[in-house]
Image (cartoon, helix red, strand yellow):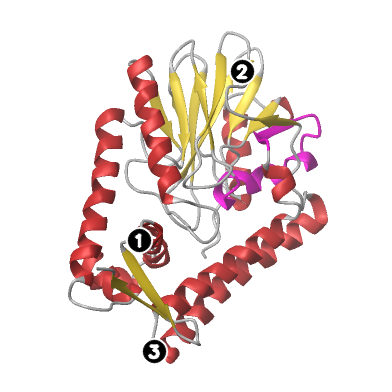
Amino acid sequence: MRRLAAKPGEIHQVSDLIYRITLSQPFYAPNQVYLIRDEQTMLIDSGYVESIASLALALKSLGLRMSDVDTILYTHPHIDHITGGLLWSQYAKRTQRWGHHRMAADIPDYPDFIDVWQADTARVLTVAFKDKQARNTRIRRANERWARFVHRFVETENKIGDRAVHLDRLLKEGDEFSTGKLKFHIMETPGHNTWHITPIETTQGFAFTGDLLIGNIPAIYDKLDGNLEQFQQSLSNLLELRKAAPHTRFLPAHGDEIENPERAIKIVLKTIGILENGLLKKLVEGRKDLVDLMESAFGTKIEGGSHFITALELLEALLRKLMREGRVGSQVYADGYEEFYLKH
């Protein structure tokens, strides 16, 4: 991962009380942190640990210090949403941090949580690759990337941050709160992540969708902290929200505002259906592994790209869903490699 230069995150004013701060990060797409500048000052998500200086500089350009932030609300605990907040108490001890009501209890040590992610990356590569040399090369490279991240994170956390996910308020479905002029309620929206929540602002009409709706299909880590059926249900719940409040604007954690939420949600749900049908058609040919199915779904170029693991995880989530439905079976070999087949 490349090291990021500290420069202010790009600021965009969404409304009179809401700002979007775009933070670069050394992986995936830039992250969006939202600033609520009301009677109470709130951040929705806190960005990646190495982006904290850029976030602080962006706040400074708006005349705010980190200590002026009353609350950080986490949509979910993935590294690009929460690790900046784990350092926050060093700079602003008064800032409260809020999140899903089970998140803190389920993640007592964040570096250990990252170790689980590293192990799952190795697991999915073992499932995917029959060729042990190719598999081991991939795992070694992935482990090197994770080790670089964990070393920086743990070293920083040992010095100034929180290893544990500390929450001052535990949020659950239907909870309500106010920052002054703005009124919020919480939707629990699991699927991309077990502890994912979507804050809904009802006065001006905004849904802060985190990684649930980002304009395309986010990663679904079925064996880790995601579930495709829950993801689809959470998207359907967002559609119901738009029916009840059709002027609600959708602000994602990656990318621009979702211009047509109904269309975006329907496209994601339709794409899932297309991918499922594609997997079933490919399996008509006979047993296939994850690499075969990924190349069929996305082409061979993705193997050399930064979204390779994400693609494997998404296809595995689709296959596990089809297995739960009794439509697909698998054979797991002694070394962990797995082939999938169509059940008749």
The residue that mark 2 highlights is 176
Q: Is residue 283 left or right of residue 78?
A: left
| x and y percentages locating residue 342 in the rendered image | 27, 70
- Above or below for 214 versus 312: above
Of the image marks 2 and 3, the number of the one nearer the N terminus: 3
Q: Quadrant location of residue 329?
A: bottom left
Residue type pointed to by label 3: Asp
Residue located at (81% from left, 34% from top) = 93
Whether pointer 1 and pointer 3 mark residues with C-beta atoms closer than 8 Å, the reply is no
Highlighted magenta segment, given as a residue range:
77-101
Residue type pointed to by label 2: Glu
The residue that mark 1 highlights is 326
Residue 204 in sight: yes
The one nearer the camera, 176 or 259, is 176
Q: Secondary structure at mark 1?
A: loop
Residue located at (57% from left, 44% from top) = 81
